[in-house]
Amino acid sequence: MPDHRITFPASEEQIRELRVGDSVTVDGHIVGIRDRTQIRIFDQGVEPPLDLSGAFLLHTAPGVRKVSEGKYEKVCIGTTTSARMVRFTEPLGRDHGVRAICGKGGLPDEAIEPMRRYGMVYFAIVGGAAALETTQIEEIEEVYWEELMPECLWKFRVKDFGPLTVAIDSHGSSLYHDVQAQAQKRLEDIYANL
Amino acid sequence: MAVATDLQKVVEDAAAHLYVWALKDIPQDLRDALADAAETETSVPGQRVLQTILKNVNVAEEERNLVCQDTGIAVYYCRVGEHFPLHPARIYEALYDGTERATIEHPLRSNTVHTLTRENTGQNVGYRVPIVHWDFVPDWDGLDVKCVPKGSGSENMSFLKMCTPADGVAGIKKFVLESIVGAGGKPCPPGIVGVGIGGSADYAMHLAKEAIARPVGTRNPDPLVAQLEDELKDLLNQTGIGPMGLGGDVTVLQCHIEHADTHMTLNPVAVNYQCWAARRATAHIGAGGDVDYDREA
């Protein structure tokens, strides 16, 4: 299982090199996004105020401290459960050219096909490990849609962000699918002996 | 040991301290359980997760930051002595004010919203929030307050089934297993599986929540229940869900069960998950306003 280092925004070619189980460390710029941000983009049809092509999206609603108008500093930034937002996977890839979605707990199987088709990956981060994650975020560079606080659109500059695990790749594999299939088999054996 | 005459203010200060402290400094029993998990785990992604968790706990300490960004919904367990000289109505006010103050002063992310409008209701307080559970103790003049900030990732993985008496103990085991396998990586495993059995539907879930708030690895005093805790822990760790659901040997750190007697036709089973960042902190408050903080209770 190789270790990769990628700077975002990234190309489709870089994403296609990744396979489930690989470890990835990220530098560059990432975009914080959550339920209400995506409801605004896709259900209310509002164009996002920044270019998402090649982007790395992080499922987050950070804890921040306001320092001046439109400027925030980090307090504690961590990652939320991704599964609630699975239905946005396809339009994020098809209409916006997003390359990576990062969150915790995984995406259901309906994310596998859009990720294969549009050249995207899902990165698993360690949920709850926010103290460490906060040290890997160098700065909150921009915040858009402040009225959705804390579910705004955030632009972070990161260094040594990770380690992340490739949990769904762009070749049709999902660790979550495989782990569930194996667990269901094991449950059959366990039930037989109860 | 601070001695104050204004007991309501003492309880408020304690609540404000407990909420932040619980979010930053996880108990030793939990640290030990996480270290044991890292010793045991053989999968590569699972090991990567556990090493990151251990590192994160240390970074939280060094940076004096929160272990997890989800400041949760504030839940308090109060044990009120018969002779404690502050009425529970005032204790509730103090817990409410302390939660609100801690949220503003730190500052902490506020999570509390109106359930229908989804509008934020304030500083981690609102209608019936914080959530407070009460126990009353005869022949005592003290107050114990345990703060358990409960994150939503794990709370969303709560399940209730009204099994039948004919489903028996096997039915209880099956339901717990299918709940935890179905939850997969979403509740941030490996954590504490709280199980409530018996009572009524609502009481079973109350007991499951009480179970996750126990010190990690304690056993139910009833040997039959304690045996079920051990069995379920082993079975859950045979499922292979692993750390953060990425596959591995350690799916749960512990299974804690609380029980109540029930109706002859009932067999309720409730599951309440607590993530690996199983935060809790306690204050023992005397009638004279002296406060002892206790991370391990």
Image (spheres, coloured by chain):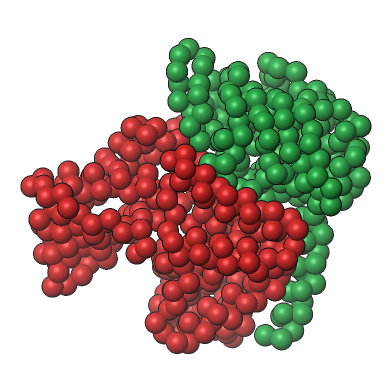
Chain colours: A green, B red
Q: Tell me: B9 left or right of B188.
A: left
Looking at the image, is A45 positioned above or below residue B216? above
Residue B113 lies, in percent from the top left, at 45, 37
Residue A87 visible to the viewer: no
Q: Residue at (10%, 56%) from the top-left corner?
A: B288
Residue B274 visible to the viewer: yes
Looking at the image, is A164 positioned above or below residue A52? below
In the orientation shown, which residue stands out farthest toward the left?
A: B5
Q: Tell me: A22 left or right of B128.
A: right
Q: Tell me: A163 left or right of A1.
A: left
Q: In the rendered picture of this protein, how many numbered marks are placed on residues?
A: 0
Residue A190 lies, in percent from the top left, at 72, 80
Q: Residue at (65%, 25%) from the top-left corner?
A: A157
Q: Residue at (58%, 24%) from the top-left corner?
A: A139
Residue A25 lies, in percent from the top left, at 74, 39
Q: Nearer the viewer, residue B170 or B142?
A: B142
Query: Which image quarter holds the C terminus of chain B?
Result: bottom left
